Amino acid sequence: MEEIKLIVDGKRLDGRGFEELRPIKIEAGVLKRADGSCYLEMGKNKVVAAVYGPREVHPKHLEEPDRAIVRYRYSMAPFSVEERKRPGPDRRSIEISKVSREALEPVIMKELFPRSAIDIFVEVLQADAGSRTACLNAASVALVDAGIPMKGIVTSVAVAKVDGVLVLDPMKEEDNYGEADIPFAFLIRNGKIESITLLQMDGRVTAEELRKALELAKKGAMEIYKLQREAIMKKYVKEEEVME
Amino acid sequence: MISRKIVLPGDLVSTNPKTAGPGTYVEGNKVYARVLGLLDKTDTGVRIIPLKGRYIPSVGDTVIGIVREVTANGWIVDINSPYIAFLPVLENPAMKPNRKPNDVLDIGDAIIAKVMNIDPKMKVTLTMKDKLCRPIRVGRIVAINPTRVPRVIGKKGSMIKLLKSELDVQIIVGQNGLIWLNGDRRKVSIAEEAIYIIEQEAHTEGLTDRITEFVKKRKVEMGLEKPEEKEVSEDQG
């Protein structure tokens, strides 16, 4: 098979620089019946997130006496990929749901709502690479929109290694034919990155490269954080304008 | 009203941990916001007025609930919150000996009650031993976002007084976002519309004046009152 060149003339296949994100569009509060919701586009990824709760736990045995439980469901629509995906949870989406939930759990103040559940549903309508990062970004905006107490905002972005260089926010070709894909999620508080809440790696990089990847991801995350803030502010801006 | 800034979870709101109020949390001697809301900062304290969120019961609140289940010793009541409430038979003055609970209140009945007790496991107990409390047999129940309830009541009840005096309807506001209205059907409709406007435009300035104007206009439109000022009649055209 012929080797696919992923970097041509110092640029990536879609014309981006190495440290450039795909175009992002975020809209908060898109679903009427959910407590909080968000529609997000990250390049060709299109995802919608819905948050319900805190609400009663069903089935009852999952209830925790001293804190709320967090449930996260990542799901891909059958039409989200080129070849029809069998609907329903599979091995991959169960795993993504678990790691994403664990990325959000330390940020949500669960102890404020004993015996309740916070449900997060994220549906991938169109998938490109990095759909888990897009979903986390959308879920985080939806959580804020639902008025759920949190320590900060979660922002997620991936870094990939393709043709020997580290690139930010890989798209499909880079993910499929690259050497490594490293999704990150950060807790951002007061405009500063406080901690890493998710780190996965597919492929191989050196320790030095991982350090560089982290720096690159931090830069990208700050940009996404600004967009997330803007999206939430935009929904409430009318109220602010009148007040001023 | 002073202009208030919108804050997001994690925003630094103060560096004095002693001032931390509702909607904030302290970590490392700094005060951060924990919910999406409006920043209310004074010399003595910082608090966040939430813009969204569910109703979390607290003792003494007046709530409107719907009976979901009848048991031998009381009623299980849905109070529009993550936690269901329990109204014991002993706390309902309508219970007389030799009456069964389901003769007094049945599934689907709406009641006005007070939160009597909440235990650490968030088991909520209600009481109806208060002159305000009653089963609801007439009128209309309007649901709004619980975080907007303080605005519907207004400063020292100003907004609710306005609606009551202008429209001559009975209004009881549940802290859980359910509001009971009773009176002339058309007037109740105006009150309902007004409440939705308050919900939509809560946290904006001059809301009381706009509501006064709106109620007057609607009353003329519904033919309940003759236009008194010339400006009002011009607005009609």
Image (spheres, rainbow, N blue to C red):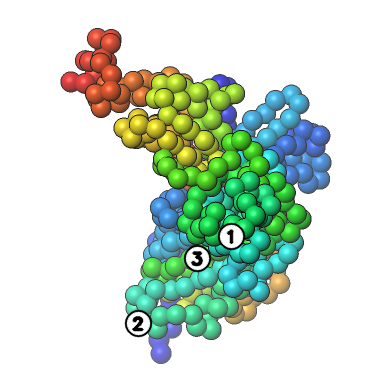
Q: Earlier in the sequence, mark 2 or mark 3?
A: 2
Residue farthest to the left, as pictured:
B237
Q: Which label was assigned to residue A121?
A: 3
Which type of secondary structure does the marked residue at label 2 adopt?
loop
> Can the viewer see residue A118 in this picture?
no
Left or right of B21, for residue A148: left
Secondary structure under the numbered disc 3 in the rendered image: strand
Q: Is B64 placed above or below A64 here?
A: above
Disc on res. A83: 2
The kind of secondary structure element at disc 1 is: loop
Q: Which chain is disc 3 placed on?
A: A
From the viewer's perspective, tell me whether residue B168 is left or right of residue A226: left
Q: Is residue B17 visible?
A: yes
Which amino acid, mark 2?
Answer: Glu
Which residue occupies the foreground of this view, B138 or A47?
Answer: B138
Pair 3/1: label in front: 1
| Residue A127 vertical position relative to residue B225 in the rendered view, above or below | below
- Residue placed most toward the observer, B58 or B207: B58
Q: How far from the left and from the top, in percent, is residue B44?
A: 76, 26
- Residue at numbered disc 1: B100
Q: Amino acid at mark 1?
A: Lys
Q: Label 3 vs label 1: CA separation?
A: 43 Å
Distance from disc 2 to disc 3, alpha carbons, whole Å, reads 23 Å
**Other residues around mark 2 within 10 Å, as few (<14) / some (14–19) / many (≥20):** few
Q: Which mark is residue B211?
A: none
